[in-house]
Amino acid sequence: MKQIALFLSAFIAGQFLLAASPERPNILWITSEDNSSGWLGCYDNPQAVTPHLDSLASQGIRFTHAYSNGPVCAVARSTILNGAHAVTQGTHGMRSRHPIPAIYQPHASYFRSLGYFCTNNSKTDYNFLGDDKAIWDECSGKAHYKNRATNQPFFAIFNFTTTHESQLFPANVKANRKRGIIPQTPLIDPSKVVVPPYLPDLPEIRSDIAIYHDNITALDTQVGRTLAELKAAGLAEDTIVIYCSDHGGAIPRGKRYLEDSGVRVPLLVYVPEKWGALSPFKAGQTVDEIVAFVDLAPTLLSLIGLEKPAQMQGRAFLGAKRIAPPEDPVAFLYADRFDETYGMRRAITDGRWKYIRTFTPHLPAAPYFQYQFDQPGWAAWQKAWKDGKLQGAFRDIWLAPQPVERLFDLTEDPSETDNLANNPAHAARLASLRERLRSEMISAADLGLIPEAMYAELAPGKPIATYLANRKQDIPALVSLAFTASAAALDDLPRLITHLTSPDPVTRYWAAQGCLILGKSAEPAAGALVKLLEDPSSAVRVAAGHVLHVLGRTEQGRTALVAELERAPGEFAKINVICALTRIGALDSITDEWLARTLDDNGAGDLKRPARRILDERRLAR
């Protein structure tokens, strides 16, 4: 730690010497929430009313293949802030607040070292242990570049929540209409909105789409005001303007999904003539390069003349230190725990083809989260499924198992509804993309390989990333085992049984997961799984109990899982238990006393969310 501190002190001191170097641009960064690129007029949505953003696109640069590496806010923001994949840092679980290695420093720290006034207005949600506000000179709803010293350059973020999924919740819609943020009646008649082919055509979904168009227009008005304020201050020609959303959404199968509706984002950059040398692109140009959130921090540093530090994984796509894209660029995408719901998916895309692999195919693809059901469209879709009114993909999203592999041709099938993974004509491409994903996970030292329930056991109080870094030589084998487990076949069972007795808990976990995914065919592993009910690791015990329940040892499996609520170390391990109890239909085995105790526990964190939901549903049923 002392060596790191000395390094950072020397680095920052050196950067202060650069403050006397030639003038640098201001950076104004506007972000919105939960809107994929397809909601804007400048991204070819004919129903959008977004004149200010369309104007920004016409005067600036429009990136057509920009991706949020993670389709949820806190995961995405940690990637942006530190210029490294969330799965490398250990920030891939939604609102986890785990410690991360000290080498990761937020982009704002480099700006501040050059004398920039750095403000954030106002969302943080950075997903790692620490004081979010300390990163900034100002961080609040009043933070503003106007508060800087005379002639001081600034880096200012304005984050608008107008388009967040929660703004489709009826109470918020009512409040926004009362405040005049959106009209009393949608600008577009719900009967005339375009319903994407991946969604059932339900009245509630049509209504949500119409209202969301109004939210997008309200956002556009906010952007217009922000840009007008910059111009009125006489700063427009000294300031590079960036606009993007934090990920896709907000209607169903957007946020939290690795389809483009969840990860493909609008990215507009205005570079004034004064700073034209910092961009190889012309005003009004459309750029098809693959760019992702992991690239944003290196690009910001490049715009102010700095090389990216070694720990940043992306490439600078603008600025003095721009790096041309590689010959075979892909965006690496990931989705893991969303608050109280565990799951693991990975994907890569080159803009034309997308490969998605589900490492937990024993789980349905909906829901990945409970919060979303306050949205009428999601609730209506779920009800229509429960009522038996849906067929095909509209029904199958709620069922398990899910396909392990999905392959989409985004040119022919931009809505990602035609899975080509089982098409023999695409077998070679499928194999190639599968191996590329494997390579990306190894290169990233993907921490999704380690169940979050193990963090407190393997690295108590320390970054789990450091633990995996010390096992770097094991990562290829762990990735291989995870690939095998996720697509487990009967021929894989001998290998899985052998790994159930491994001295490594991560290996035992994936072996048990493979048995769970294999289902009743894993019966020969039952003896080894019974022994794992007393494994030192909670995640392994839970996996073993879950498999035994599937194998017909229902009482043994249920009893073990219920007991684990008391044994499991910490909120994330207990959330894992609740997920397993949910899957086996045994939530009624959780006592009211345990639920009440959890809700009274100040240290329970996100464990309170499922506890409250279970207790509320139980009271309603009574």
Image: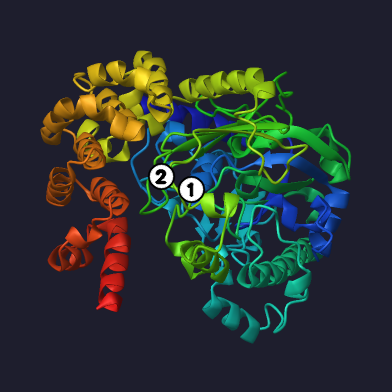
Question: Label 1 crowding class (10 Å Cα cut-off): few <14, some 14-19, many 20+?
Answer: many
Image quarter where the N terminus lies is top left
Residue bearing the label numbered 2: 363
* The C terminus: image quadrant: bottom left
The quadrant where residue 516 appears: top left
Tell me residue 381's x, y (percent): 54, 64
User: Dot 2 surroundings within 10 Å: few (below 14), some, or many (20 or more)?
Assistant: many
Residue 254 visible (yes or no): no
Instruction: State left or right for residue 269 relative to residue 501.
Output: right
Q: Residue at x 29, y 25 (%)?
A: 511
> In percent of the image, x 59 and y 50: which residue is there?
392
Q: Amino acid at mark 2?
A: Leu
* Model colouring: rainbow
Is residue 55 rendered to the left or right of residue 65? right
Is disc 1 placed on a helix, strand or loop?
loop
Q: CA distance from mark 1 to mark 2?
A: 7 Å
Residue 570, horizontal then vertical, whole percent:
21, 48
- Amino acid type at mark 1: Ala
Q: Quadrant of the rendered structure where residue 605 is?
A: bottom left
Residue tagged by mark 1?
Answer: 365
